[in-house]
Amino acid sequence: MAYKTNPAPYQRTKKSTLQIMIELGIALAIVWLAAVITTFIKLGSSYGVKSILLMVVSVAVTFACDAINTVVRNKKDKTLGKKIVYDLIHNYSWITAMIFTLLCPVWTSYYVVIVGSIFASVIGKLVFGGFGKNIFNPAAMGRIFIQLCFDLSAPDSVHKGLDTVTGGTLTGAFNSTQQWLGSYPLEGYSTWDILLGNYFGTMGETFTILLVVLGVILAIRGVINWRAPVFYVGTVAISSLLIGLVLGFENPLLYMIYHLGLGGLMFGAVFMITDPVTTPTSPFGNCIVGVVAALLTVLLRVGTNNVEGVVYSIAIVNLISPSLDIFITAKTNKNTGVKAGVTFGLSALTVALTVAMAWSANGGREINTINGLSRPVYEELESYTTTFTFMEEKDYQFSIYSKGDDPTGTKGVGKCAGAYSIVNASLEEVGVVYGVPSKIYIDMNGFELEVESVAYVAISTETGKVLGISPASKGYQGDVYGNKVKDFLGGYDFENNDFTVVDVPSLQTGASYSLVGMQQMANAALTIYNAAYGK
Amino acid sequence: MILFRSVGRRHLDGHKELSKHSEIINLGSKKGSKVYFPTMAPNASAIKVLVNPGDKVTVGQKIAERTDFYVPIYSPVSGVVLEQENLFSTNVNRPIKHIVIENDGLDTPSDPLKTVTLDSTKEEIFAAIKEAGLVGLGGAGFPTYVKYNNPQGIHTLLVNGVECEPFLTTDFVTMQKEVDALLNGCELLMKASGASKAIIAIKVHKEEVRDAIKAKLDTHPNVTVKEVPDVYPMGWERTLIKEVFHKEYDRLPAEAGVVINNGQTVISLGKVLLTGKPITERTITVSGDGIKNPTNVVCKIGTQAKELIEACGGLACEDVNLIPGGPMCGKAVNNDVFPITMPMGSLTILKVKTYVEEPCLRCGSCTNHCPSGLQPVEIRRALKAKDYERMIKLNVMSCVECGMCSYCCPSRIELTDAMRNAKTVTKFKLSQMKK
């Protein structure tokens, strides 16, 4: 019989760190399950199996890193075996691995996932001293590393199962076609597809509604701190809605849904910005972090046209978290008015800044649509009509010029009396000329692809009909898609049909082409041509 | 707004059912038993002993007196004073001299104190409270009369019957049993403080107490019962006043126009002031999973803890934590010979649980639940870094050691211990800075 004097208090909560992490792991597993099922249905069993194996590989690699770390740090310990097992469970590397894997698209190579997992685990976490001591979110570190080092765009084999061809993911498509500044419906995807996750992205990011539900459950169960995500998502939502309203988008609400549903924002809000280790401890600090992350996300998306706005912004706010912890020393239950003022003030500032940024990125112009084209694109088209010559030749020859005076020397294969050109000569020019291009779709006889707003259109000056469209541009994915179109059109009888294919080998564009887009392009060109030449 | 503010409270598993309805054991007054009185008050000030070994004392005879505040200590038994003994005292957490009185079992009463009636004046009541030698029975043991020393601008008397510590049921059983004394005490204290109304705060789910009080409220129109949420630390003055009045204050509750007293203190006052018999015994909860028959025990003040443990059937297992007080605020002691003091509300006896500490995951649970609005996680880091200025900046001295941070910590970090250490070093630093 003995009276022990271990430290007070003598009653403790049942909730342990292990339990918190297991609940988080279950939530991640649910997202993963959804991803696996979706992959099996949409891309078939080989990718379905890969979606399972990627996770297994990533977890195994981080476990290996942990084990080696423990061995190196406790070389002479006699209970090394026990220590390794303890560390494997209590370093919570499996959470890191799960988050990291869900941040990768399913077509990521195994070696990329292995390299990313090692980076996330070793550089992101273990060099700092393991769980609880890392500065950056390890999974975000891994993701940024592979983003910078490897090409994560989808391979051809995936394209066959996809409608989207640009960049591989829908977020990439939205990024490269509308530059995060447009509310044109993404071809083939309804709003519900985006909310429910019926599109391709990284494995975990697509299931917006599922993620919201999981986030609410986790917050109620006290697993995650709800303040940062609430301010994060809230500020992004208000920012994007206001950008949509101020810039006069057709559908500001859809624009907001794109911002919330694409690019893994919800995944970041539920699983990454809530990482307790790398965010502040005080309630006020968490509010601030949410707002700052929102600012960075929208700025990175709108200002620099970046797909990975979420991961980058979370990594950057991880940097300011320690400072916030140092600055916030006042009592946490006092001066709530001041704190609310600061947070909402920051929020308002964020919204103002992002709207201004969007405005300037958009050239300060009002966007609306003419003939299915956004106004800037239309205006650009119109300006080109005056630059390019329509050659009045009866033998249907035509030439195409790039923007400068230098003719590219391209010769028409078809028979055209004139050429209507919409040209961009280089990648930079895509950005400059079509600063805010909408995604344009061309549909030729049911064959669907989506394109940038770049094409050569040949219009007969006699009949006023479109004679040829040049989809081909060399370099970047131009070859692939150009040739696809060419192959498809190659079988056409030009005498009886209105279309021809022009090969433009010397032009470099960042565009990819689709027949849907070309149809629209042709229509637009026709409209402009008719307006200009009165046919 | 809750968005920016920490929560500062949390529901705990109360374990009240262990002793709530158990039969109360009365140890009575046995011949040959001894009672002990420490010669140091809880704030380590000395207590002047007025009796010598060999003296005969009667029940209610003044045997000692505190030196900082005037608090007389009355003998709860009649008998002979023995030589002083060194015993562990919970007042100062170390062995000190104790006055020892051997009970002769006769309970010879001495002359009663000056009594008051419900119609007495404010000054008469104040004098009687002072003479009664009452200290707060809720646990801290602050002399009751000090609060009534010419208070200004008091509008409400708040009776704290919340009892938010787990396992404790003394307030529950006594408030239920002695409603008349409680209400009389309320009337007297309202008069003494100049308050126009009294609010008795009890937790929800204490229907028995609520109904017992409400049944007798007809004759006391200025007294109301207020039910407060079952969260910890609801019984702390600041939390309770914030809950009931939505007011915060800087130093003393009087700034919010409230005077606050523990329910048992009010009951004792109601009895002592009207009868003139000093308080000689109190009800103590002996509970926890380390004792065989958890229940409430009525015993003479000064009885040794081991007698109570024996009365409750002894320990249930080998290694236990014996905590004078509740499991949250209390601190386990390494012996069972210490005597029961007047403010001690319970003996909590728990099976020893050991926890494996994990690295801090910086979840902020401790910050979010600290009732004082502190950031224990940051204070612990500052303590590790020996950054005293930062500890002062983080208001470490506002810590009340309620135990909430350690309770909440999912990584089982001994935060309350760290907070105690931080307070000690900061106190030292502050005293150095003054010089």
Image (cartoon, coloured by chain):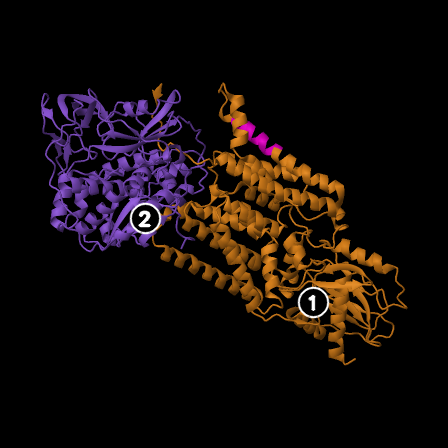
Chain colours: A orange, B purple
* On screen, residue B175 above or below B105: below
* Residue B343 pos. (x, y %): 24, 35
Q: Is residue B205 above or below residue A417?
A: above
The kind of residue on which mark 2 rests is Ala
In this view of the protein, can residue B433 be seen by the observer?
no
Q: What type is the residue that disc 1 sits on? A: Lys
The residue singled out by tag 1 in the image is A403
Q: Which residues are magenta?
A: A60-70
User: Which secondary structure, mark 2?
Assistant: loop
Q: Residue A335, percent across and down?
A: 34, 54
Host chain of mark 1:
A
Secondary element at image label 1: loop
Residue A331 in magenta stretch: no
Residue A64 among magenta residues: yes
The quadrant of the picture occupied by the N terminus of chain A is top left
Of A325 and A387, the residue lying toward us: A325
The label on residue B215 is 2
**Residue A188 appears in view:** yes
